[in-house]
Image (cartoon, rainbow, N blue to C red):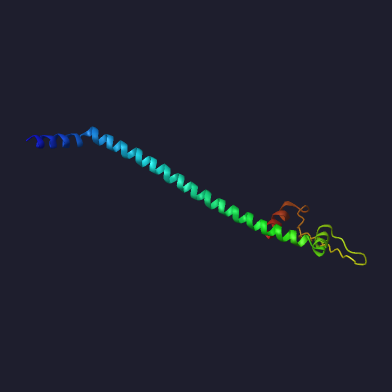
Amino acid sequence: MLPLEEKRKFKRILYSKTTLFVLCLAIFFVGRATWGVYQKEKESQQNLELTERQLDDLQKRNDYLTSEIKKLSSPSGVEEEIRQKFRVAKAGEQMAVIIDSPMPLPNVVDDSGGNWWEKIWNWFKR
């Protein structure tokens, strides 16, 4: 009989409100910790993607700057850069400067003259 009473006592303790409360409390804290780890992993993934994009941009910039250095290491590249930046010409060459014409002003109706009936009529015509 003793083992049967021990089983009942064990069940009574296991299914008591206090035990269930402690179990629920433990599940809550474990779940909260798991959620925190999940959020940190998600943030780390975003930081990794951002860092990879920055690395890619820096590699592209490095390639561009390397090509510019190679271009400027030759005399023709230096001459081309000077011509672009300072707009100069060699001796014997001529340079033409083209200036865009100013844009024409739109036609504006002059409503300054006339009586107020004419101003209203002009307003409806527009």
Q: Position of residue 114 (x, y in %)?
A: 77, 54
> Could you say which quadrant of the image residue 18 lies in?
top left
Q: Residue furthest top?
A: 18
Q: Position of residue 75 (x, y in %)?
A: 82, 63
Q: Is residue 113 left or right of residue 6?
A: right
Q: Is residue 40 above or below residue 77?
A: above
Relative to the observer, which residue lies in front, 93 or 104?
93
Q: Is residue 54 visible?
A: yes
Q: Position of residue 97 (x, y in %)?
A: 86, 63
Q: Is residue 3 left or right of residue 27?
A: left
Q: Is residue 30 above or below residue 121?
A: above
Look at the image and tell me in which quarter the C terminus lies.
bottom right
Q: Residue at left 73%, top 59%? A: 68
Relative to the observer, which residue lies in front, 124 or 29?
29
Q: Is residue 61 above or below residue 94?
A: above
Q: Residue at left 63%, top 56%? A: 59
Q: Position of residue 82 (x, y in %)?
A: 83, 59
Q: Residue furthest right?
A: 92
Q: Is residue 15 visible?
A: no
